Image (cartoon, rainbow, N blue to C red):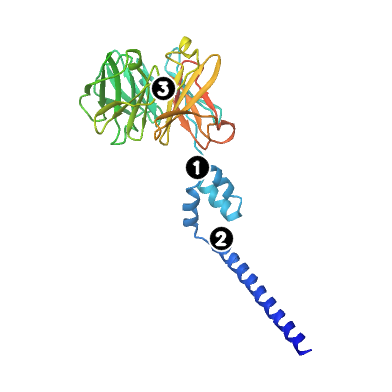
Amino acid sequence: MAGRKRRRLKLLAVTFKDDTRVSTKGNIEQEEQEAWSFLPVELLEFIISQLTLKDNIRTSAVCKRWFSVALSVRVVNKPPWLMYFPKLGHRFEFYDPSQRKTYSLELPELHGCRICYNKDGWLLLYKPRTQRVLFFNPFTREMIKLPRFEMTYQIVAFSTSPKSPNCIVFTVKHVSPTVVAISTCHPGATVWTTVNYHNRLPFVSSIWNKLVFCNGLFYCLSLTGWLGVYDPQELTWTIRIVPPPRCPDNFFVKNWWKGKFMAEHRGDIFVIYTCYSENPIIYKLDQANKEWVEMKTLEGVTLFASFLSSHARTDLLGMMRNSVYFSKILPAEAMS
């Protein structure tokens, strides 16, 4: 009888210890949850602000407090606007695809100008009659003049906003089958700097018609898909050993000069090939393996392709995600 009583007391002791262990574990989990719940608002804002839009939305479902903080730091990227050129007069129209609204602006400053490139809300303009090159912001009406320079039909781009001290204007021109002329300038300069570089490509392959600035370098895409790279710091021009992207079989029959677009976003470079009888083919440059990789999915990226400059966005809301948009209604240009 005494032995049976001792076994019962021992069993009760073990049960009590297990309950204590479970209770202790539960208390720890509860304390951890409370610790997260009572994080300072500033710290919580910092943590959630580092998340992608998708994770931000998921985080907002945790509790009311997190919903409020997630909503306050949620950043939804906006698509570029489409700029329509008037046949007569100076009234330009700007279309916002996210709101599906059109706005009109009288811009007499653009009279006699040719738009060469746009980025960060700025237009790069050229006046053929006076050979004047200038920046113009259509929303603030601010104008920044550059030295006069003769531009024919070579491609041109700039690295960042002309208000930045790092802004560089870059243009490359085919001179001969083995030579290209690269000209650069920056706001505040008095002259353009032009240097000729040797170009080890056949004649047609050395005609450059698409251009983006990415990771401190200007990337130029030739008619046949070869990639030239200019380093504005080292003042070097090289041809990357990257085989051209594979094109549709009949791509060069009709679209040999206008059916190709190139865009940059957060260090990635995209090339879009179009053909009347084919769906667009999109490639992303794999810098490590030196090859163009065909994208089976856009991975949340939205591409806006236009003749002079194309743009890419992520974290767009609604049906605009994972899509490619073309400025088919001419004359029009996608404006970042």
| Mark 3: amino acid | Pro
**Where does label 3 land, which residue?**
244
Left or right, residue 136 beside residue 130 = right
Instruction: Report the Cα–Cα distance between label 1 and label 3.
Output: 36 Å
The crowd level at tag 3 (other Cα within 10 Å; few <14, some 14-19, many 20+) is some
For the residue pair 199 and 90, the one nearer the viewer reads as: 199
Question: Which is nearer the N-term, disc 1 or disc 2?
Answer: 2
Q: Give the labeled residue for mark 1.
A: 75
Q: Is label 2 in a helix, a strand or a loop?
A: helix
Type of amino acid at the residue the image marks with label 2: Ser
Q: Nearer the viewer, mark 3 or mark 2?
A: 3
Tag 1: residue type?
A: Val
Question: Is 276 displayed left or right of 204 in the figure?
Answer: right
**Above or below, comparing residue 226 to residue 286 in the picture:** above
What mark, if any, has residue 37 been given in the picture?
A: 2
Q: Is 280 drawn above or below residue 252 in the view shown?
A: below
